[in-house]
Amino acid sequence: MPDTTEGGSIRAVVGGVHGSDADALLGRASRAPQPTELVVTPERLHRRNLKRRLAEHATPRSSLRLTDATTIADDLLDGVGEPVDTIDRIDRLNHFETLLQRKTESNRRLRAAFGGDLPARVETIAAAHSRVGELTGWADDRLDDLSTVADGLPGVDARDTADVVAGVRALEDRLVERVAPIHSRETLLPAAADALRENPGRWRETFPAAERLSVAGVSAVDAPLHDLLDAAAAAGVTVTVSLRPGTGPDIAERLSDRLDVEPGRGVGTPGARNDTETAVAPGLDAAEFVADTPEGEARVAAAVVAGHLRNGVSPSDVLIVARDAGEYERSLRRALGRHGATLAVWAQLPAERTVPYRQFAAVCELLGNDGVDVEGLLEPLSFEWVPPQGDAEEGSTAWPLSAARVGALRAGLADESPDPTERSVDGWADRLDDAVDSGQVPGADAAALRTFLDWVREQPTAPEPPDIHRTFEPLVESGRETALPAVFAADSDDLSRTSRYARALSRVEELLTDTRAKYDEWLAAGDVPRSWLAVADLAERVVTTRPGRREGANAAAVDAIDATDAWLREVPHVVAVGLVDGVWPRRVESVFPEAFRSAVVKGDSAAARRLAVPGRWTAAREVDHLASGLGAATESLAVTRYRRDREGTAMERSPLLSRVSADSVDESATQSLLTRGTLPDALAAGGGGSR
């Protein structure tokens, strides 16, 4: 490697709740003509939180470029000439489905691990492929290390691990042949690292003023990221890896095992090893509430929030955190509603379960089939189909049709035969005429269905990519103009259904663009026919690939977020829910045997210590989440749990609470909170200390 730069360094810093590392990063922010420091965070919301902290301190940040590792790698490879064709998860699954149908030795080994129908297990096999990429970055030496670790396991575990690794390694080789050597994050980052090692001056050419690279708030340093950081340090860059309190000590301890340290390079791990039971909320005593059931827990958490609001606290100064906020959305929204409070859940929108998306899918199914039964015919109307503006006579029909009117159509069109009859659109038009003549369907309802059938006839049977927008954009707009006001009129005071419906319409708009691009690409490759059913299948693949977390913005609402997303946030009052064993922390799940995961995590051998540790494989990641959530509190902290789940099974206190200085709130004080709204003294007074 040409020695054209002075040696840089890699420094691992284990932070506390928010950590001196974050404070140091904020302290380095300044005004500069070009960024002098690249800052990588694992989540989009983490970047948002960092921007918020900088704004709160009125700190200029032009010296910092907030980015991600793939963007840095893309920039470094720009102009190198190496073919880069990174594919998304949908394309990867499509390639895997094709490859898994072949009769090969590697697929035989996968069938031994996953069962006979490999395409049906494509999601699970793809997850195993991703884990091996994280462990090794697909580097031959690390793959050999992985095999060495597997060979040292007991018989069945060794065989199962070897079968999975051999199978997904063959899939990776075939992906390289079918797509390009650089086709994923796991191949992109190591390729950028190789280019940087060959020409260390490329860093300065790409980022002229950037002398520092900081990775902030991570719970894992996988092999691809490790390679990029190592190459950057070799190119003279000062690299700082700011680790979180749960996973940080072990990551820092193993960095030296995984780094190829050269003369002049420094690898520092200040503060790397700390007490494994370090408190995650130093300076605050938590009030611990126990309820009988999850619903009772939600009522207790809502009562704590309401108590703060009655004491004059702004909704923006109270934060609810959970391991998975989405799981608590319904019960918390209901419980807070009893107090007249509004909840805004910052979570991924499950678009596939929303009315606008289900309408989209139902229309595609109807357009794509030669014949449908009465359910298939009326399903779009059940999901509030509204004709495009101008397609219906003014005042002739109240759109969207009510459930009662759709039910009346269903009853009037149904056959006496027990087996549902499938008809074409024209066949259903004839059946409608007969039903009207016989008095089975009222004239007004018939007019509405005829409007729908006329619209269906106008749509192309073999859609081109632009037809996706031509067909569905007017429906989205009519939904916004007609259906959304109807939802608003029937909504509760917190407008939660209206917010969800509006977000879903926006998500469907994005879906149209994403699906059109993928449909165009797959048509050109001959992977799909021109069919609305193909459009529906692609849309389903796109919609189940979760976008970044989204929020229902509402300044008058109390935020509920995943605890990990509270990293770097500061609010006076935090309520953490779900501190139940099995809920928080969650059980580690993986396709790999527990013995293999344990060997990698413990690093008992030299080969194991050279492998990255996937964050999902260690319970310490749960500590990181808890530290981010509880550490956001500056004045008071409450934690809640329940004794029995909805099936009546006894649930134990979360072991993570051993890291929290918590005072139990007795039953009488809890009942006083629920019945009279009286906060315990510690919470009412601000919470037992301050940071």
Image (cartoon, rainbow, N blue to C red):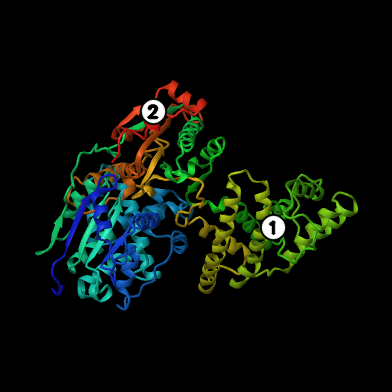
Mark 1 Cα shell of 10 Å, populated few (<14), some (14-19), many (≥20) = many
Q: Is mark 1 on a helix, strand or loop?
A: helix
Residue found at the very far left of the displayed protein = 263
Give the image location of residue 617, x and y in percent: 32, 46
Count how many numbered circles sit on residues in the image. 2
Q: Quadrant of residue 88?
A: bottom left
Instruction: Identify the residue position indicated by label 2 in the image.
Output: 681
Instruction: Please name the residue shown 33% across and 57% down the image.
Output: 41
Residue 271 spot, x, y in % from top left: 17, 47
Q: Which mark is residue 409?
A: none
Determine whether, in the image, residue 479 is placed left or right of residue 671. Answer: right
Task: Report the disc number at residue 482.
Answer: 1
In the image, residue 297 above or below residue 671: below
Establish if 439 lies above or below 295: below
Q: Residue at x 70, y 54 (%)?
A: 376
**Dot 2 or dot 1, earlier in sequence:** 1
Is residue 356 visible in this depiction of the protein?
Answer: yes
Amino acid type shown at disc 1: Thr
